[in-house]
Image (spheres, grey):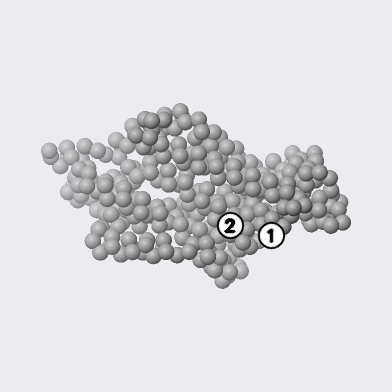
Amino acid sequence: MTTMDAAAESTPGSARPVRTSALRLLLRDRAAVAGVVVIVIVVVVALAAPLVVRIPGQDPYTYHRSVLNGRGAPRGAFGGVSGSHWFGVEPLTGRDLFSIVVYGARTSILVGLAATVISTVIGTVVGAAAALFGGWIDRLLSRVVDVMFGIPVLIFMIALGAFAPTALPKWLLVTLIVGFLGWPPTARIVRAQCLSLVRRNFVLASRAMGGGPWHVLREQLLPNLLGILIVVVTVAIPYNIGYEAALAFLGVGVPPPTPSWGRTISSAIAWIATDPWYLLGPAGALFVITFAFNLLGDGLRDAFDPRAGGRR
């Protein structure tokens, strides 16, 4: 086999039939399709939040003291649910809970998506570099990944959030913290995949023809990593949304009055005995978007795995 024949054995273009087959399998998975529909609906609602909250005629910043009783709890049944307040109102402030949940989707999804992009880029570069260069670079990067896995992430996030400059926007701080601490799992997955790919004939041929490491990464490895990276991203997004909610729950997330699901859930815990409906809206929204991403991630994993895809 000549060098050119080896290069033609498997090229980035050969990954297209695999992606097409995976898409067909994904479309047959009703759970994954349902997850996609839910994600699209939530994203559209988040993007169009100012228009959506105009339907009941509310916003997340106006206080409605008249709907509260003397103890600060909402008047009426179900936490003050009415035609004007679809999810009820927030105790003590009277802010519309439906508007808080809708605007809170912006914070959670923005942080989840941006942090996932950061962690995926860093993890892909580190994992691919370790596999491509090998030797002491691989050993060094692998030890760095091991050290990062040993860091108690949530505690470290809380510590960084407490000592960060106050001038830095909290949502940006949370995004950077979650993104820069979340790349080790991606690095390990990419390294394992690249170690398998670098032994393939098309990569060996590309190197024999003078292709450098970054050329091999860009032209040969990344197209063949696309499937696994899509799965990694869909799995990482709900985890990162959960991290943002956890930080907000612990009081180191975005500050009030910026709507946030996690902070609203934290506030609702104190009212669980007298106003359980206060918890239902933000907790339900967090569960729905997380569950939808998990359904999509499971569907993509099965679609890109020939054995799992065949069984389904």
Q: Is residue 22 above or below residue 67?
A: above
Decide: marks 2, 1 in contact (CB < 8 A)? no
Tell me the distance, in whole angstroms, between the alpha carbons under discs 2 and 1. Answer: 15 Å
Q: Nearer the viewer, mark 2 or mark 1?
A: 2
The residue positioned 40% from the left and 57% from the top of the image is 184
- Name the one closer to the observer, 312 or 141: 312
x, y percent for residue 77: 81, 44
Q: Amino acid at mark 1?
A: Pro
The N terminus: image quadrant: top left
Image coordinates of residue 112 in percent, x first then y, are 53, 51
Q: Residue at x 41, y 39 (%)?
A: 301
Residue at 56% of width from left, 65% of height from top? 158
Residue 246 has which mark? 2
Left or right placement of residue 172 versus residue 103 in this view: left
Among the 4 quarters of the image, the one containing residue 52:
top right
Q: Amino acid at mark 2?
A: Ala
In the structure shown, which secondary structural element does the residue marked by tag 1 occupy?
Answer: loop
- Percent from the top left, x then y, of residue 19? 37, 35
Is the residue marked by circle 2 packed among few (<14), some (14-19), or many (20+) residues within 10 Å?
many
Which residue extends farthest left?
Answer: 1
Q: Residue at x 32, y 37 (%)?
A: 15
Q: Which residue is mark 1?
A: 256
Mark positioned earlier in the residue sequence (2 or 1) = 2
Question: Is residue 88 or residue 133 the one in the foreground?
Answer: 88
Residue 276 horizontal/vertical position (percent)? 73, 49
| Vertical relation: 81 (above or below) 23 | below
